Image (cartoon, grey):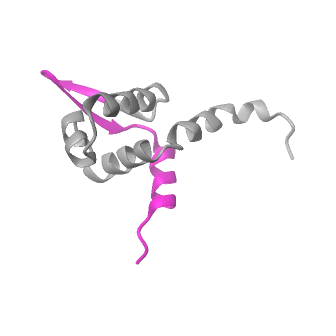
Amino acid sequence: MDKDYRKYNEVSELLKVLAHPVRLCIVKGLLEKGKCNVTYMQNCLDMPQSTISQHIQKLKSAKIIEGERNGLEINYKVCDERVEKLIELLLKEED
């Protein structure tokens, strides 16, 4: 066992950000759709835009997702391969 646990800090922070049902739902939805904007997420999740934006900000700060501006619209997508693999493993549908 490695007693230098500080090197696990980044992964721990990543897991903390993902440890919220709405953020998990957003990430899973982005992986399924490829990319989408806040309005689309708002309609799917039936939540206020401000709530979605707060969750988006946390995901962006953790570098889990990134936004691409297209005029007034920002489309978000997952940009961390580790998260993609993790979500696939944890939330894969049973056949």
Horizontal relation, residue 14 to residue 43: left or right:
right
Q: Residue furthest bottom?
A: 95
Q: Is residue 61 above or below residue 29?
A: above
- The residue at 14%/21% (across/down) is 72
Magenta residue span: 67-95
Q: Is residue 63 above or below residue 40?
A: above
- Quarter holding residue 64: top left
Q: Is residue 84 magenta?
A: yes
Q: Position of residue 76 (x, y in %)?
A: 29, 34
- Quarter holding residue 5: top right
Q: Position of residue 2 (x, y in %)?
A: 85, 41
Q: Position of residue 85 (x, y in %)?
A: 49, 53
- The residue at 32%/38% (across/down) is 77
Q: Residue furthest top?
A: 72
Horizontal relation, residue 16 to residue 75: left or right:
right
Quarter of the picture holding the C terminus: bottom left
